[in-house]
Image (spheres, rainbow, N blue to C red):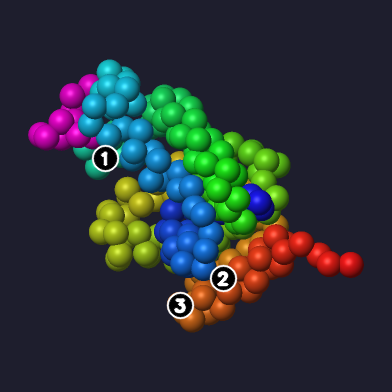
Amino acid sequence: MIKVALTGGIGSGKSEVEGLLAARGATVVDADALAREVVAPGTPGLAAVLAEFGPTVRAADGSLDRAALAAVVFPDPPRLARLEAILHPLVAARAHEMEEAAELRGDAVLVHSMPLLADREHAAGYDLVVVVDAPDEVRLERLVAQRGLAEQDARARMAAQASREQRLAIADVVVRNDGTLDGLVDQVDRLWADLTARTTPRTS
């Protein structure tokens, strides 16, 4: 099984590439999805977040109010670090469980999709690091126009992650996502061909 790290800054289109790889047969472990899973109602993760940040980040139905939490942590690096200290071990444990299950099934390509790889310097643990890249101004425009974020909030979220230069420095493969969807699909097709070639046993 080949282990691929897929990363990209917020607004880069990492989730789009993740979906394209999944459609081609990759097994995906999505850190963003796991971060939501580990703070679902009734979980120890949610209890820990509420204990740290208080009732203002709890929605009326008892779930986590993610927008309220984002407004608290993204402008405040120390508080963001405290949130990450709660979430990262929980996400890592769940990702490890999913990876073990993939190995038992004999899956060929496992993609760990994560936004913070460049920040935590874990690139060495993967066979290939794929970075989805777009210029900062393009990412900012997407966050404002497509996600409805205020420009100040969008800039705060971008600033809370690694820089574009830091991500590109760890890349084995760069998927450029500042053009057309067809162009993105073509790049993913080439990437998938490379991944499947790596997992196909060579015959003498």
Magenta residues (range): 53-64
- In this view, the residue in front, 7 or 69, is 7
Indicate the secondary structure of the residue bearing disc 3: helix
Task: Name the amino acid, label 3.
Answer: Leu
Q: Percent position (x, y) of residue 146?
A: 30, 64
Taking the image as shown, residue 69 lies to the left or right of residue 17, namely left
Name which quarter of the figure residue 53 lies in. top left
Residue tagged 1: 66
Q: Is residue 62 located in the magenta-colored stretch of the structure?
A: yes
Q: Percent position (x, y) of residue 107?
A: 58, 53
- In this view, the residue in front, 111 or 48, is 111
In 3D space, how far apart are the residues under numbered discs 2 and 3 (Cα atoms)?
Answer: 11 Å
Indicate the secondary structure of the residue bearing disc 2: helix
Image quadrant containing the C terminus: bottom right
Q: In the rendered image, is residue 12 in sight?
A: no
Q: Are the residues flagged by discs 2 and 3 in contact, CB closer than 8 Å?
A: no
What kind of secondary structure does the magenta stretch mostly adopt? Answer: loop
Q: Percent position (x, y) of residue 79?
A: 38, 27
| Mark found first going from the N terminus, 3 or 1 | 1
Asked if residue 204 is positioned above or below residue 30 in the image, the reply reads below
| Mark found first going from the N terminus, 2 or 3 | 3
Indicate the secondary structure of the residue bearing disc 1: helix
| Mark found first going from the N terminus, 2 or 1 | 1
In 3D space, how far apart are the residues under numbered discs 2 and 1 (Cα atoms)?
Answer: 31 Å
Residue at 41% of width from left, 45% of height from top? Answer: 32
Asked if residue 99 is positioned above or below residue 111 in the image, the reply reads above
Q: In the rendered image, is residue 182 in sight?
A: yes
Residue at 58% of width from left, 43% of height from top? Answer: 104
- In this view, the residue in front, 178 or 131, is 131
Residue tagged 3: 181
Q: Please tell me how many numbered marks the rendered image carries.
A: 3
Residue tagged 2: 188
